[in-house]
Image: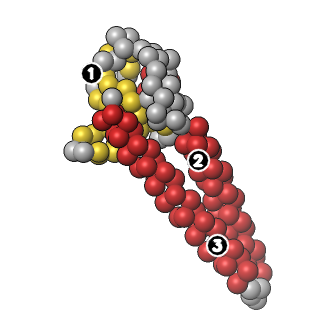
Amino acid sequence: MKKDLNIKQQLLNACIHFVENKHTTISKSIASNKNDLFSETKSSAGDKHETGRAMIQLEMEKAGQQLAEVNLMQEVLNKITIEYTSEVVCLGSLIKTTKGIYFLAISVGKVVVEQHDYFVVSAQSPIGKQLLGKKIGDLIPFNQAVVIEIL
């Protein structure tokens, strides 16, 4: 049980690091785009100037949407209590199955902890939706022909 708590902590830390990296990258992109927008000067080719500004604006909007997604990920991580154990799969659960071990948090993908692969998935992902609310012994149909059993 204590080992699972340690693994969950390491997985949660990996999620936090993932979100922090994304936030930093997006923030740098926004700052760069703002700088580009302010330095974009009116040239003799007016249409070219307007097109350049429009492209920068589109990049800013895209980065803003990405930042909103990262903020939602952070909110999900803030709701996770790794000390909580439950018979039913919920946010923050470490789920051992016949097809691998999953950590229900945010979509990060494969994370290696202590030389073992863990799949960090969100509750909104296809496998996350299937796992949510299940318990040991439940069978989950996945990818049509594949059946996963919770161990």
Instruction: Return the x and y of residue 113 as percentages of the image width and height.
Output: 29, 45
- Residue at point 77%, 81% (across, down): 46
Instruction: Return the x and y of residue 65 as percentages of the image width and height.
Output: 66, 52
Q: Is residue 88 left or right of residue 100?
A: right
Q: Is residue 57 above or below residue 134?
A: below
Quadrant containing the C terminus in the rendered view: top left
Considering the numbered disc 3 on the image, is that residue within a helix, a strand or a loop?
helix
Amino acid residing under circle 1 = Thr
- Residue at point 24%, 45% (across, down): 114
Read off the residue under disc 2.
Answer: 74
Q: Is residue 26 left or right of residue 53?
A: left
Q: Earlier in the sequence, mark 3 or mark 1?
A: 3
Considering the numbered disc 1 on the image, is that residue within a helix, a strand or a loop?
loop
Amino acid residing under circle 2 = Gln
Read off the residue under disc 1.
Answer: 98
Instruction: Return the x and y of residue 15 as percentages of the image width and height.
Output: 46, 47
- Residue at point 46%, 21% (across, down): 86
